[in-house]
Image: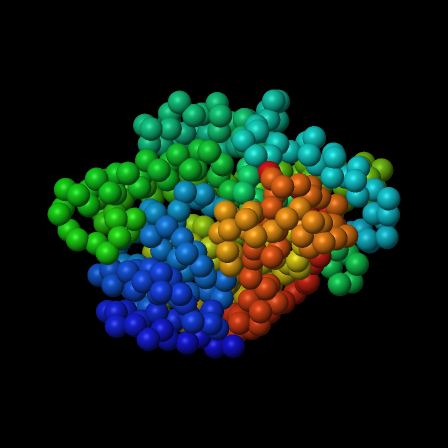
Amino acid sequence: MAYQALEVKTPKPVLSWAGHPLESQETQMAKNVASLPFVFKHVALMPDVHLGKGALVGSVIATKDAVIPAAVGVDIGCGMAAVKMPFNGDQLDGKLKKIRKDIEAAIPVGFEQNKDIEKNVINWQGWQQFKDLHSGVKRLENKALKQMGSLGGGNHFIELCLDSENNVWLMLHSGSRHIGNQLAQCHIKTAKELLKLSEQKLPDPDLAYFVANTPEFAAYWRDLQWAQNYARYNRDVMMARFKQIVEQHLAGGKATKPLLMVNCHHNYAEKEVHFGEEVYVTRKGAVRAQQEDYGIIPGSMGAKSFIVKGKGNVESYCSCSHGAGRQMSRSKAKKQFTVDDLLSQTEGVECRKDKHVLDEIPGAYKSIDEVMQQQSDLVEIVATLKQVVCVKG
């Protein structure tokens, strides 16, 4: 599948890998972004694209000398981690429920936080910069410390998976927790205040931006990088606990050497070089897929997930989708599906099956197979995974 250029009259084109026409609201959102004066070359939409705040989830926005905090979003550094273990699926027989219970006991989910703080969390380098962060989060240092190594809620999950060769994989999805959210809110507020002062007209106030070489831009960029590092390390901390639990059950507690480890963001911004120019690239629900980059594209809690390798497609700014993408809102999913639907759609998966996770039912998501088909020019599939245990917030 190659991209199609949307038929929109905007200063910069919009290239879409979605393979289906966008709905009118989605098209408007794409047009709004493509009309901004500082957007570079074109806007790229991934195959899992859907409505977001300000910008579409599943969009890659390259900009010159400006960045849009609401386009990065409030879960700064949200992303995935996966580890291929030297175990075989047969070793899991009869152990799935116990493994799930142990994960739930070791890793706080939802709004929960850790009661005890591990040494590796206290020793994280990032705490040294905490004093430099936005004054609006100063009171949150203790909470940030206790939430390091916690999952959160919504679509965040921890899964034990098997690939098509019956190898055991550990996989999880999480971000920068409350601290990342609060940092984002502080800076989005500042950007909107600046927009009001400038009396500039934007198609959507959520596209309020910071201009490079201003104190506001510098402060946001510093806090953004900090929160992205927090998110990455948060996944590492949880993964270490998860790995220990699985080793307890399958290797008598003996530490093992992983066969492959991947940790990638899908809500973030970085400085990169594209088409020979240095630009700021915001991936809002998209994964970097430069040549040889490993990435993770999860399905929903009853569907397949994929470990991929990037093909370095320049038109997508070397990016790919970050998952299946929702096809209906959380409230609509709760109205449309029943717990019986959830039971049938998550058959064979050891997971919660109650009304509180109905909004995460596989039927609320696009088909992951179709999404993968649409991006065969962006990534190659390295492994196809299917979960046997799923823990959600």
User: How far across and how far down the image is residue 313, in percent?
Assistant: 47, 71
User: How far across and how far down the image is residue 149, in percent?
Assistant: 58, 34
Is 45 situated left or right of 258 in this image?
left
The residue that appears at 43% across and 29% down in the rendered structure is 128
Q: Nearer the viewer, residue 224 or 303?
A: 303
User: How far across and how far down the image is residue 48, in percent?
Assistant: 50, 62
The number of numbered badges drawn on the structure is: 0
Is 358 situated left or right of 197 in this image?
right
User: How far across and how far down the image is residue 302, in percent?
Assistant: 67, 54
**In the rendered view, would you say 179 is above or below 210?**
above
Is 321 situated left or right of 28 in this image?
right
Based on the displayed image, in which of its 4 quarters is residue 5 positioned? bottom left
Q: Nearer the viewer, residue 243 or 105?
A: 105
**In the rendered view, would you say 27 is above or below 72?**
below
Q: Is residue 186 visible?
A: yes
The residue that appears at 75% across and 63% down in the rendered structure is 164
The residue that appears at 44% across and 33% down in the rendered structure is 179
Q: Is residue 270 visible?
A: no
**In the rendered view, would you say 103 is above or below 162?**
above
The residue that appears at 60% across and 57% down in the rendered structure is 363
Is 351 situated left or right of 95 in this image?
left
